[in-house]
Image: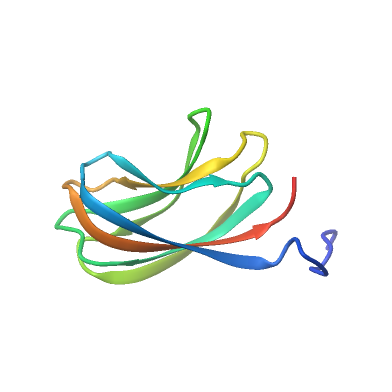
Amino acid sequence: MKETFYKGAAGNLSLHVVTVSLTALAVDATAIASESLPIGTQVTGVRIINEALGTGTELTVQVADHSGGVKDLAAFNTASAGNAGEFIKPVYIGDEGPSDLVVKNTGSSAATGEAVLQLEYRYKGY
């Protein structure tokens, strides 16, 4: 194990919680959940707690950098109310600069309602 075990301010596992209110988010449309996640952040998991957003809806949580690059983190079926979570292969926000946390409707119909996103991350440093 070559990485140092946590002993200070950087590196501890944290949870960023954001509530997203969607009003008829069209198919393939996106909504920004949180702007400018800092360089040096490593995302390790995503959770969602949602209302029923409509038949055929699915939200994909993404990280979008300011030069147009997009990384899908996890997709969640949001047709009925519920909660779900996924551990993901760590995604590091680095040279591409600060990135936005985005939700995209990847389902087959518009999404309306509220979803709470919980982004699990650790600040690794740049």
Residue 71: horizontal and vertical position, in percent? 49, 42
Q: Is residue 2 left or right of residue 117?
A: right
Q: Is residue 16 left or right of residue 77?
A: right
Q: Position of residue 98 (x, y in %)?
A: 59, 40
Q: Is residue 28 above or below residue 73?
A: above
Above or below 124: residue 82? below
Quarter of the image where one finds residue 2:
bottom right
At x 23%, y 48%, the residue is 107
Nearest the eye: 3 or 49: 49
Q: How is the image coloured?
A: rainbow
Frontmost residue, 63 versus 74 = 63
Say which residue appears at 17% left-offset and 54% top-offset. 56
Quarter of the image with the C terminus is: top right
Residue at (24% x, 70% y) in the render: 81
Name the outermost residue toward the top: 67
Which residue is at a point 69% across and 48% down the rendered structure image?
A: 40
Q: Can you give x and y, in whole percent of width and height, for residue 42 in the image?
A: 63, 53
Q: Splitting the image into 4 quarters, where does residue 48 fall?
A: bottom left
- Rendered view: 73 above or below 30: below
Badge count: 0
**Residue 105 shown left or right of residue 13 in the figure:** left
Q: Which quadrant would the N terminus be assigned to in this image?
A: bottom right
* Location of residue 69 in the rendering, given as x and y in whole percent from the top left corner: 50, 32
